[in-house]
Image: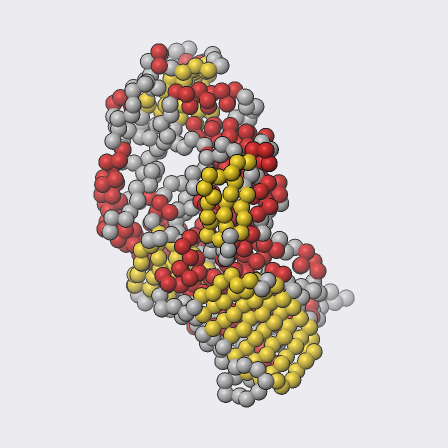
């Protein structure tokens, strides 16, 4: 009995569509890239209902003859490859001949196209891969492809799509990335009848970055340009002080194709590492022009990943280019001093005396810049930034006198070590408290018990928040979630919002930074979270931003507040992210360690 069968063409097309057409943004990406391959200088994208009911991509490219248009919807029909060796010299975005047949198999598709040299064009309609209309019409030169009712015949796929706000943001992000890599082409994006992106053709990358991201992208940035063995690295770098908690600001393009590549990302992070706190990531926009025979783009269905022939050489070139860019920042006097990077040699331990802090921290900027310059010339094999609050001053390493100790609820705090930990003792033994993690848990519990409606307070001066298009679309779809945790945010124009209220007594510094980090989290997770999931993450983030930081020098009353807050907490004694905030050594254990027993 024969068990193996050749799949019917319809099922094979649906399987192929599952690999290529992940979501509406995948359709946009494939069709826009086809337009670029056709030499388009102007591309317009329009979507309704997050792209599920209606998508239209119009371009002024070369158009297709009727014969080519019909063949284009056949699987593996392509004008980009002729022989196997062509796979080693791919210079176009598309080459497999899978995008159009995959899209047509799960939607109702309408193509109108006309080459410049022909008087009449073609109207070609398909439904679930079956031809419904094939006729000559008059139309503009170029191509216009309309996709309706995406996934209408695969309802299971449609059910697994994300919330409309998330899918819209993916569409905007796809267009933004392609626009960044092709700044000589005009791009326009319309969502639900509203223009969200309009980028005229520009002559430089900085101009295109401004057109795509507006004033929200870090400024100033430094240009990067490095070449070796025919490989070029070009792009823009932001100063380390403009870092963020996710990788969303790290964008890489290989031969104008947006990619994810661990080796390139590692090279960038290694160059930035001495100047960034753990868990922070830089803004950077890097374009790598690599000989096509060095790049294998045929390793991922969506071509988001590439394989490089000499990963080590490219890694070294990228790292060298980024270091040179950071060196230019220093030469121009724009290099920031990350608060986590100190050159002092010993940890400080200070008592809670009434005398003011007389350390001259502000004078350390020049020394740190000198250390940075030395690093760029002779980078160490391993570099670990010293913890916050380290000091070489003798008075910061002395133990507090008993009269200066702070006691609350049986716990006595002797002093502050490294401006990060509270050292103390009680009847059970000696302990260290992480001041940030402890305060973070205290604030989280208070926010969690609060009623957002009752605890909301109006801002004295409402805060205007201008966002790139993709983030604006995502925020507009989640305004209700922000309201549920005490933030009233309203639309104030194209990609602009106003923050009018915040939770009472909340202090998170720059609210625009906090909102952007929440959006980062949603983008990183690729979805609009459920209300409870959003609330939990928002409360954790609010507590983290509002809490005392490692490196803050605490006054006695603040220490007392932390101790009183800890008394009200129930085990486990951890921060909201699960990190312990208190470590203990029983007296018996200390006696054993000092060999007193």
Tell me: residue 340, above or below residue 407.
below
Q: Which picture quadrant has residue 10?
A: bottom right
Q: Which picture quadrant has residue 356?
A: top left
**Apparent side of residue 156 relative to residue 390 in the rendered image (left or right):** right
Q: Nearer the viewer, residue 271 or 276?
A: 276
Tell me: residue 211, above or below residue 66.
above
Q: Residue furthest right?
A: 1
Camera sees residue 590:
no
Tell me: residue 404, above or below residue 281.
above
On the image, the x and y values in percent for residue 206 come to 36, 61
Q: Nearer the viewer, residue 394 or 379?
A: 394
Q: Residue at x 30, y 63 (%)?
A: 227
Tell me: residue 290, above or below residue 376.
below
Q: Residue at x 65, y 68 (%)?
A: 148
Camera sees residue 417:
yes
On the image, the x and y values in percent for residue 543 come to 50, 34
**Apparent side of residue 136 relative to residue 227 in the rendered image (left or right):** right
Q: Residue furthest front?
A: 460
Q: Residue at x 42, y 46 (%)?
A: 244
Q: How many marks?
A: 0
């Amino acid at each position: 009995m024969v068990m193996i069968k050749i799949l019917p063409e319809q099922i094979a097309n649906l399987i192929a569509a599952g690999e290529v057409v992940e979501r509406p943004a995948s359709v946009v990406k494939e069709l826009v890239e086809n337009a670029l391959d056709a030499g388009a200088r102007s591309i317009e994208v329009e979507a309704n209902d997050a792209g599920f009911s209606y998508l239209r991509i119009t371009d002024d490219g070369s158009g297709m003859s009727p014969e080519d248009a019909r063949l284009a919807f056949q699987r593996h029909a392509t004008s980009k490859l002729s022989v196997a060796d062509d796979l080693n010299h791919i210079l176009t975005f598309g080459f497999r001949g899978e995008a159009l047949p995959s899209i047509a198999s799960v939607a109702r598709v309408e193509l109108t196209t006309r080459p410049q040299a022909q008087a009449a064009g073609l109207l070609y309609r398909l439904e679930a891969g079956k031809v419904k209309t094939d006729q000559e019409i008059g139309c503009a030169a170029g191509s216009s492809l309309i996709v309706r009712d995406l996934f209408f015949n695969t309802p299971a796929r449609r059910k697994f799509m994300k919330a409309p706000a998330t899918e819209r943001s993916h569409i905007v992000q796809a267009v933004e990335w392609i626009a960044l890599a092709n700044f000589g082409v005009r791009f326009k994006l319309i969502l639900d009848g509203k223009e969200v992106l309009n980028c005229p053709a520009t002559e430089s990358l900085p101009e295109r970055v401004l057109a795509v991201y507006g004033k929200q992208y870090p400024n100033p940035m430094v240009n990067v340009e490095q070449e070796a063995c025919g490989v070029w690295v070009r792009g823009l770098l932001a100063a380390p002080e403009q870092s963020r908690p996710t990788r969303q600001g790290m964008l890489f393009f290989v031969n104008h194709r947006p990619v994810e590549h661990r080796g390139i990302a590692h090279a960038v992070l290694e160059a930035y590492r001495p100047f960034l706190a753990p868990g922070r990531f830089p803004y950077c926009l890097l374009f790598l022009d690599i000989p096509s025979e060095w790049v294998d783009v045929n390793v991922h269905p969506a071509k988001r990943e590439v394989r490089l022939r000499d990963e080590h050489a490219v890694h070294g070139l990228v790292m060298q280019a980024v270091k040179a860019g950071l060196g230019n920042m220093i030469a121009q006097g724009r290099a920031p001093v990350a608060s986590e990077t100190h050159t002092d040699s010993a940890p400080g331990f200070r008592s809670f005396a009434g005398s003011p802090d007389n350390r001259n921290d502000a004078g350390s900027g020049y020394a740190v810049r000198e250390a940075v310059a030395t690093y760029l010339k002779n980078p160490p094999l391993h570099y670990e930034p010293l913890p916050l609050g380290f000091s070489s001053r003798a008075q910061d390493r002395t133990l507090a006198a008993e009269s200066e100790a702070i006691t609350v609820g049986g716990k006595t705090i002797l002093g502050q070590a490294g401006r990060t930990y509270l050292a103390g003792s009680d009847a059970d033994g000696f302990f260290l408290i992480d001041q940030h993690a402890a305060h973070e848990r205290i604030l989280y519990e208070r926010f969690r018990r609060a009623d957002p409606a009752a605890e909301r307070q109006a801002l004295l001066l409402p805060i205007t928040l201008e966002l790139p298009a993709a983030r604006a679309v995502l925020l507009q779809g989640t305004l209700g979630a922000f309201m549920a945790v005490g933030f009233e945010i309203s639309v104030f124009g194209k990609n602009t919002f106003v923050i009018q209220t915040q939770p009472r007594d909340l202090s998170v510094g720059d609210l625009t930074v906090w909102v952007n980090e929440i959006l980062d989290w949603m983008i990183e997770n690729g979805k609009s979270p459920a209300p409870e999931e959003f609330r939990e993450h928002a409360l954790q983030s609010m507590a983290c931003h509002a809490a005392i930081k490692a490196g803050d020098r605490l006054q006695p009353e603040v220490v007392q507040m932390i101790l009183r807050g800890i008394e009200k907490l129930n085990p486990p004694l951890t921060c909201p992210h699960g990190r312990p905030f208190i470590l203990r050594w029983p007296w018996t254990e200390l006696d054993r360690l000092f060999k007193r027993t």
